[in-house]
Amino acid sequence: MKQWILGAVLALMAIPAVAEIGDDGLHKQPWMRDTFKDLREDLDEANAEGKRLVLFFEQRGCIYCAKMHEEVFSDAGISDYIEENFFVVQMNLYGDVEVIDFDGESRSEKDMARKWRVMFTPNIVFLPQEVPEGVNAMEAAVAVMPGAFGKGTTKDMFTWVAEEHYASENGEDFQRYHARMIQERNNGSFD
């Protein structure tokens, strides 16, 4: 009986935690920051922590967002990597919270999404440590991850940005980097 109870407890501990849903209907992760959405301030704070600023667009009822949270971000290795290396600001594709862009323009989340041509969710925008004056977030982005991907692709994208492979002069764009990582993992999985 004791072994059965111990087995049940261990099995329950192995079940990944599912992200909570906030009052806005969006999934919440512990590594998502609640900021005033002034991107210059967010960038300064991210840099002060030695992290990269990421904008994460989601929407209420998004099945692909749910898939990312339930199947990808529930992986402790991926979630821990994001928390250690990134300053993540969540954006609501249809939200009314004011956002101040790097170029100084102030709009609601939904209007900023239109300005940046974000049309679906999830959409993850990776920003550099320095953004020139007069440039908006999408113009400054070093990478955009449009859509829901599996664990391997997601981890590779976050790693590719954190390690600044986008600035590499060896010609290894993300697709080549990802293909190399798949081969190095040598697990026969594309993800």
Image (cartoon, grey):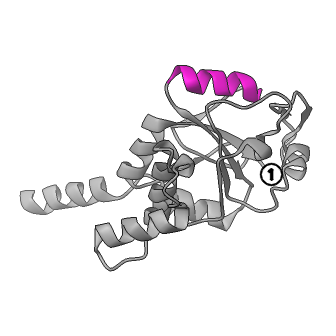
Tell me which residue sits at (82%, 36%) in the image. Answer: 135
Q: Is residue 92 visible?
A: yes
Tell me which residue sits at (66%, 30%) in the image. Answer: 130
The magenta-colored residue range is 36-49
Which residue is tagged 1? 93
Q: Where residue 48 sits in the image (x, y, percent)?
A: 54, 19
The residue positioned farthest toward the bottom in the image shown: 188
The residue positioned farthest toward the left in the image shown: 2
* 13 drawn magenta: no
Q: Where residue 53 sits in the image (x, y, percent)?
A: 61, 36
Q: Where residue 94 sits in the image (x, y, percent)?
A: 84, 50
Q: Secondary structure at mark 1?
A: loop
Q: Main secondary structure of the magenta part?
A: helix
Q: Is residue 80 left or right of residue 103?
A: left
Q: Is residue 174 left or right of residue 118?
A: left
182 and 170: which one is in front?
Answer: 170
Tell me which residue sits at (38%, 65%) in the image. Answer: 181
Quadrant containing the N terminus in the rendered view: bottom left
Tell me which residue sits at (56%, 65%) in the image. Answer: 67
Q: Where residue 122 sits in the image (x, y, percent)?
A: 67, 58
Residue 84 falls in which quadrant of the image? top left
Q: Is residue 36 visible?
A: no
Kind of residue at badge 1: Leu
